[in-house]
Image (cartoon, rainbow, N blue to C red):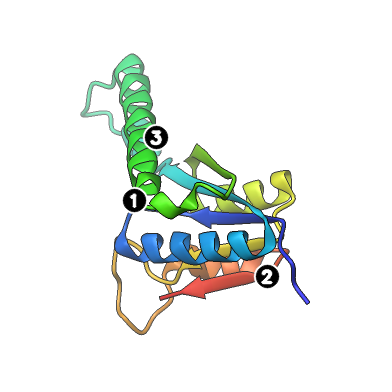
């Protein structure tokens, strides 16, 4: 029987992510596990800004400043999201923001932290279609080396 000790919850700050975080916190309380809430700032912004756009004047300092701003805003949003769960005081909850391709960073964190359960929303902000698994969740499900709980 699975008795998780470290649970990873990727979040995009959507309602779906709130539900995944709620489930992870409930499981963590049951098994006295740590919860790692992770948001990934998608690297697409930087690659879009620094790609071959000869018609644009690109200032790398501005891109770096924008990236730092996005990370700072993400940390603030993550903190606010977690504040919604006032009953999680008994659970050790670690907040983390990373840069990169979301599913790759989620899988990297799973490896680095020795995560034994990932709780992820089947749909995120993009809201794709109600009957499809989101691309991030799908890629995590395929690449994870631990059990993955998909939430609706």
- In the foreground, 17 or 25: 25
The secondary element bearing badge 1 is classed as loop
Q: Specify whether 113 is left or right of 128.
A: right
Q: Quadrant of the C terminus?
A: bottom left
Q: Find disc 2 in the rendering and name its residue.
A: 147
**Does 39 appear above or below 14?**
above
Question: How far is disc 3 from disc 1 in space, using C-alphas?
Answer: 15 Å
Question: Where does label 1 land, which residue?
Answer: 84
The secondary structure type at the circle numbered 2 is loop
Residue bearing the label numbered 3: 75
Whether residue 51 is visible, yes or no, is: no
Residue 60 on image: x %, y %: 35, 18
Question: In the image, what residue occupies the spot 72% across and 50% down?
Answer: 111
Q: Pinpoint residue 74: horizontal percent, then vertical percent.
A: 36, 37
Task: Inspect this view and state whether residue 130 appears.
Answer: yes
Residue toward you, 131 or 5: 5
Q: The residue tagged with tag 3: helix, strand or loop?
A: helix
Q: Quadrant of the N terminus?
A: bottom right
Point out the tag, 2 or 1, that comes first from the N-terminus.
1
Q: Residue furthest bottom?
A: 131
Marker count (numbered): 3
Q: Residue at x 36, y 45 (%)?
A: 83
Alpha carbon distance from label 2 to label 3:
27 Å
In the image, what residue occupies the spot 66% across and 63% down? 117
Classify 2 as above or below 117. Answer: below
Is 86 situated left or right of 101 in this image?
A: left
Q: Earlier in the sequence, mark 3 or mark 1?
A: 3
Is there a contact, CB below 8 Å, between mark 3 and mark 1?
Answer: no
């Amino acid at each position: 029987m699975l008795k998780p000790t470290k649970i990873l919850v990727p979040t995009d700050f959507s309602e779906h992510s709130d539900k995944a975080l709620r489930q992870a916190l409930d499981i963590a309380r049951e098994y006295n596990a740590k919860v790692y809430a992770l948001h990934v700032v998608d690297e697409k912004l930087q690659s879009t800004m620094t790609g071959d756009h000869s018609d644009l004047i690109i200032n790398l300092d501005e891109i770096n400043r924008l990236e730092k701003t996005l990370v700072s805003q993400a940390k603030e949003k993550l903190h606010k999201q977690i504040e919604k769960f006032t009953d999680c005081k008994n659970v050790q909850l670690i907040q983390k923001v990373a840069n990169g391709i979301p599913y790759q960073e989620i899988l990297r964190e799973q490896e680095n932290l020795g995560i034994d359960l990932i709780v992820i929303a089947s749909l995120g902000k993009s809201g794709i279609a109600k009957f499809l698994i989101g691309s991030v969740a799908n890629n995590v499900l395929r690449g994870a080396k631990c059990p993955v709980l998909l939430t609706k």
